[in-house]
Image: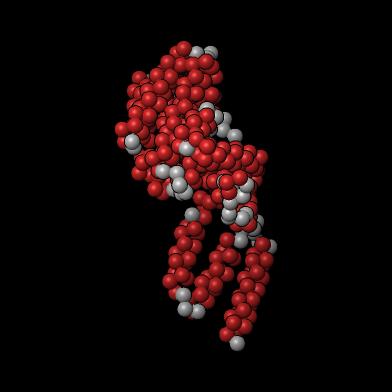
Amino acid sequence: LGPLLLGLSFIAVAGVLVVSYLANLRHTEDIGITTLVAALLTFVLGAVAALGEPAVAAAFAVLTTLLLSFKPVLHRWLRALQAEELHAGLELLLISVVLLPVLPNRGFGPWQALNPYQIWWMVVLIAGISFLGYFIIKIAGPRKGTVLTGLSAGLVSSTALTLHFARLARPRPLSAPLLATGILIACGTMFPRMLLVATIVEPALFRPLLGPALVMAGLIYAPALLYWRRTAGWREPTSVPVENPLELKAAVGFGVLLALVMLAGEGLKLWLGDAGVLMLSAASGVADVDAITLSLARMAQGDLSLETAATGVVIAAAVNGLVKAGIAAVIGGRELGWRVGVPLVLTSAGGLLAVRYLLW
């Protein structure tokens, strides 16, 4: 009788609330259902408390109250959403909530190297970080400062920002110091992001990666701060167009790249040992750091040593830095090239030296 009475009571309360809501629509244009849902949730939480879980009910009550207090802010934010941003959010839910749980969590293929669940979970991880970076840029606005632009764009793609600012610098050599500031800050942001991604997958990698990451970030942020001080009062660069990073095609493409890197990593480790893994790290760093970082972190969960995994991540980051130095010099011209190239070359060398003396 208890569950039946509870169900009938819920239906009765819901009926009264719905009738009240429909009657209210005749006199107002407000079609929001926040109050209706909150009232129903209040009944549910009361029932949960009565059934012997008062702590759970209290926790959700506090959370609900907090969300209701932000109702005006949430409404303004939702009204500001564009259609493609809403689609991106739904796509993120699709790849994380719908697809991820149904994938098998075991190895397939040669050397059992391809785990569909782990590969797709890493795709979700990168997509989530990119999604966060996109909204940081949207909410804060790239015109509010080169520093914030570099920090935000570095969460999405420091290479993309380097390419864009290099194109801006070619016809505007006098803006090279300011544009170099943004590039270096974006490149420096890559190292905390790299450390975060690796640590989420394999927490034991935090300690061996922390030292080299701090050294490399410091060697980039120091000249960026120097450039920034020298350009006080200068006009900021034009806005940085950051496309929505959450297209399913791009996510699947990253998953394919990651699967190939993981497969190659297992094969090279089997044939050449740790040297093969480090060779793969250098080759992967030419195009991307995230894929090899995630692959090495996963391999560190098995029989790959933490020192080798951390070394591979730093090698990939060092090579990637040299590639961005080349982009700045070739596309951005001499004024931008030396301002970006010298710090990036020193950073790559510093990271490798840090690995040599801190890990081996």
Viewer-side residue, 260 vs 286: 260
Viewer-side residue, 48 vs 95: 95
* Point 62% across, 47% down: residue: 109
Residue 285's x, y, as percent? 50, 30
Residue 195's x, y, as percent? 42, 41
* Point 46% across, 16% down: residue: 337
Figure quadrant of the C terminus = top left
Q: Note whether 326 is above or below 114 in the view shown.
A: above
User: Position of 290 compared to 89: left or right?
Assistant: left
* Point 46% across, 12% down: residue: 334
User: Is residue 14 visible in the rendered structure shown here?
Assistant: yes
Quarter of the image for residue 346 reads top left
Figure quadrant of the N terminus = bottom right
Total marks placed: 0
Viewer-side residue, 278 vs 270: 270
Residue occupying the far front of the picture:
271
* Point 42% across, 39% down: residue: 308
